[in-house]
Image (spheres, rainbow, N blue to C red):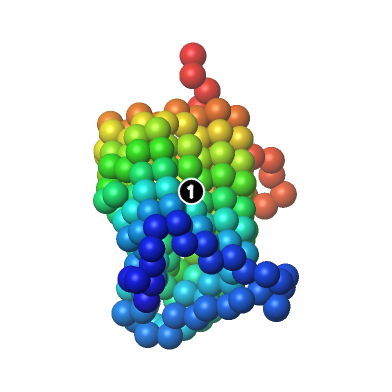
Amino acid sequence: MLSGLVPGTRIIGVGEGSSKPTFRWTATGDQWAVAAADCVFAGLKLRLEGANGVVKAILVTAANVAFLDNEVQVASGAALKATIALEVGAGADAFELAGGYWYGTATHNVTDGVKVVSAVDRLNIHDIDMDFSATAGNGNIHLTAAATKVRISRARLQNDHTASTACVACDAVAATGFISDCRFSTINNGTASAQGFVGGAGCLIRLFETYSTDEPIKNGLLGPVAAT
């Protein structure tokens, strides 16, 4: 779907709650393929959980695409969930994901929520709430390539996987940029300051005023540890 988009298309939902325009993915191969630049998707309810393992619900491969203030459901049961909710691929420079709420049922996990698989430039994720179960170490947001000038700010993320250690994960790739003013919640009872954001060898992302907790009724700790 959406393969016929022209650059600059805007799909804007009007309504709130149950009156939002709603799209549901009902087969494992269903996909929104966004390959036209400068497109905006806003104010929509996107139900990515209508089949058992929707392989890659949304794929963005064009520059300056924005998803703004959408409600995104990634799972609703053991056999109703996306495998990858949204993938940012080659060509998706200056991709913006902002506002809205992403959620799923607590024990039914996706492999990746937002997966960045190409060295895109100026990825910008901000002012967003995510509360769903993702593979424990992958997090709600997963960088698998050396993206540059990454910005993740004012995000409130919870990974509900029973063994979760990450809300944002960066593999052993030379991704650059910063994460600032975020709040991360994981379930695994380990060392909170080493969880929430998990970076592999070579990751160059820096953090500012970002806190993580892995226990109820506890304040978050600055994580990773402060620079000296």
Identify the image quadrant of the N terminus: bottom left
> How far across and how far down the image is residue 84, in percent?
37, 66
* Residue at the (28%, 42%) spot, across then down: 119
Asked where in the image residue 202 lies, by quadrant, the reply is: top left
Q: Nearer the viewer, residue 220 or 17?
A: 17
Vertical placement of residue 196 versus 23, above or below? above
166 left or right of 144? right
Q: Residue 78, can we see it? A: no
Q: Which residue is mark 1?
A: 96
Q: Nearer the viewer, residue 171 or 213?
A: 171
Q: Amino acid at mark 1?
A: Glu
> How far across and how far down the image is residue 207, in percent?
50, 30
* Residue at the (50%, 58%) spot, across then down: 40
* Residue at the (37%, 85%) spot, across then down: 27
Q: Nearer the viewer, residue 55 or 187?
A: 55
Helix, strand or loop at mark 1: strand
Asked where in the image residue 171 lies, by quadrant, the reply is: top left
> How far across and how far down the image is residue 125, in percent?
51, 46
* Residue at the (61%, 58%) spot, across then down: 69
Residue at the top extreme of this rendering: 228
Vertical placement of residue 74 versus 113, above or below? below
Asked where in the image residue 28 lies, by quadrant, the reply is: bottom left
